[in-house]
Amino acid sequence: MKFIDLEAQQARVRDLMEKGIQQVLDHQQFIMGPEIGRLEETLARYVGSPHAVGCGSGTDALLLALMAFDVGPGDAVLTTPFTFIATAEVIALLGATPVFVDIEPETFNLDPEALAETLQALQSGKPGPVPSAGDRRPPVPKGVIAIDLFGIPADYERITAVAEDAGLFVVEDAAQSFGAARRGRRCGSFGAVAATSFFPAKPLGCCGDGGMCFTADADLAGRMQSIRVHGQGKDRYEHLRIGINGRLDTLQAAVLLAKFTIFPDEIERRGAVARNYGRVLRERSIPLRTPVVPEGVTPAWAQYSVLAEDSTHRDRCREALHAAGIPTAVYYPVPLHLQPAFAFLEYRKGQFPVSEDTAERIFSLPMHPYLSEEDQQRIAEVLAAV
């Protein structure tokens, strides 16, 4: 059994992918070829965002967004410690300070109440789970990165309200949620900028690295278009600002255009797989907490993650599944505030109890559009035996 079945997906669009790749080989515009613009227009229309800026990876997308807001030393950007390191990594790369905020226990997304409390602690200097400033001046809050973890959109109404009250921008980290929706709006349309990833395992993935930013702000779009090409101005030898080499590869754009032809169908299939998981796990009264989907939300189901009773129960479940030839994964076993890379922030164990508890209990089951009901029944049977 496969955790993610890219082979079945490729079988549906292999001819289209090869045709698109051949067209790139024929016109030889390997850097910023016409497929880039076509993909940007196609995905911007799908998301419902006026502007899209293709880039080299999901990490580049986050970096472009923060650079467009001139984030740098002395600034603080708030995000959660329960995510992949890239979200906080880009903050530190720019010399700014990542400030962590605990998550909601139901969705694993940034907790709006904890966000407000952390902002108050930062601004007032009162005790709270904030990084150590040492003998330096405390960083000034400038923005928030909210993550749509596992493809379930964050609570943008409440998060945006808190951020706007404090004069902060909001970036949507939609790396796992492209194709998801919340209250009639697709992910990629929330925040001042939304950043997504086309890593092969993502709901819409290419055959390498790729990413994209979405925004309704023409000025931000122009800044990001410049930054992704070394801060380029009117020509390749005018540089308006410090930038990066963050372009999306033309060959990857061709692959994504082909895969997007079946993407809406795959999102529906992912939803059907998730609903069936809930049914077969409930029928056997298996003591795992299945994902909680807020009202008005359609997830992209990048992963199907469940909570065991404790770390021992998780280990037993995973060992039994592994023995049966069923792969699993743990996203994320060590929250970012406890990672050696962020030791300079001087956070301590116990400061983000929901994130820490989740990290000890969570694991993910196989999830892709081509997972059969028979395979799901088999997974449930193994878990029921545990």
Image (cartoon, rainbow, N blue to C red):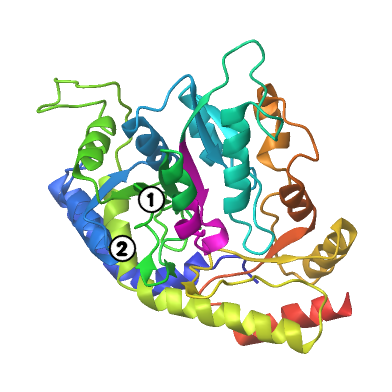
- Give residue 96's position: percent from left, percent from top: 50, 25
Please tell me whether mark 1 or mark 2 is closer to you in this view: 1
Q: Is residue 89 above or below residue 237?
A: below
Quarter of the picture holding the N terminus: bottom right
Q: Is residue 370 left or right of residue 81?
A: left
User: Which residue is label 1 attached to?
Assistant: 191
As rendered, which of 199 and 195 lies closer to the eye?
A: 195
Q: Is residue 164 left or right of residue 356?
A: left
**Residue 383 found in image quarter:** bottom right
Q: Is residue 10 left or right of residue 291?
A: left
User: Which residue is label 2 attached to?
Assistant: 47
- Give residue 368's position: percent from left, percent from top: 54, 71
Q: Which mark is residue 225?
A: none
**Residue 243 found in image quarter:** top left
Quarter of the picture holding the C terminus: bottom right
Graded by Cα atoms within 10 Å as few (under 14), some (14 to 19) or many (20 or more), the crowding at tag 2 reads: many
Mark 1 vs 2, N-terminal side? 2
Q: Secondary structure at mark 2?
A: helix
Q: Amino acid at mark 2?
A: Val
Q: Amino acid at mark 1?
A: Gly
* Extent of the magenta region: 143-159
Magenta highlight on residue 117:
no
